[in-house]
Amino acid sequence: MMKYQSRPAFRHQAPAVLTRPLVLVVDDEAAVRESICELLQSVGIDAIGFASTREFLDAELPDRPGCLVLDVRMPGASGIELQRQLASSGNTKPVIFLTGHGDIEMSVRAMRAGALDFLTKPFRPQALLDAVNAGIEKDVSLRTEARVMKGHADRVARLTPREREVFAGVARGRLNKQIASDLGISEVTVKFHRGSIKKKMKAASVSELVRAWDALPAALREV
């Protein structure tokens, strides 16, 4: 029996179940759906199968890192329609498409819409495993970035309006005397605010402050 290779989804795996990767497979062909789930489970990746887009949308799913494996052509809503619906709701989970039709135009549309990969049936098992691992790694990275961004946003929310103005000046590379002139306050006051900002933002240096500012959503950088 051929042994398939599965690269680790992330380097430091926590024991909690919610950190374990979970792949969601949506394909109306039972044999294909079950074989994909069995393949993934054979290399230690949890997988759940759904026979349709509606069945997937009606399910209560745990919030775990992973990716989606979607059949392009299904009765009812297609895989591409599901991808579009998920994207419009803010769901950034990576998508891998499967199709039994060599439709180049459809492939291009899917990739432009953000699909991670597009495999034609029958696909090589190792090609699917490689795509799934890439999808899991991407989702883990996106989740990490989101946690970092939320942490910065929560800390920014504790800043006073004046501190946010000073923070914006620091992020733009303005000197203390320039910020003081911009805001009509003393340079001593600017220095005081900078110290308070560093403490609230848990930043040890100006470079850390700048990185925190750059990681914020655009709306939070408006002062």
Image (cartoon, grey):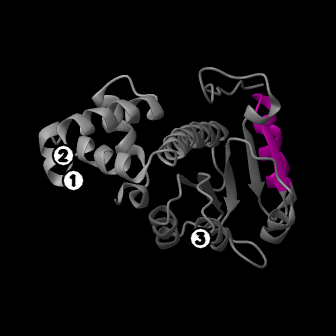
- On residue 179, which mark appears? 2
Membership of 36 in magenta stretch: yes
Q: Residue at x 35, y 50 (%)?
A: 162
In the rendering, at what x and y percent does residue 96 appear? 61, 53
Q: Nearer the viewer, mark 2 or mark 3?
A: 2
On screen, residue 45 above or below 161:
above
Q: Which residues are magenta?
A: 31-49
- Considering the numbered disc 1 on the image, is that residue within a helix, a strand or a loop? helix
SS for callout 2? helix
Quote the CA–CA distance across marks 2 and 3. 40 Å
Q: Which mark, residue 88?
A: 3
Q: Residues within 10 Å of mark 1 (few under 14, many from 20)?
A: some
Q: Secondary structure at mark 3?
A: helix
Q: Residues within 10 Å of mark 2 (few under 14, many from 20)?
A: many
**Does any portion of residue 203 appear in the rendered image?**
yes
Q: Amino acid at mark 1?
A: Leu
Label of residue 183 in the image: 1
* Residue 85 position within the rendered picture, expressed as x and y whole percent measured from the top left: 64, 71
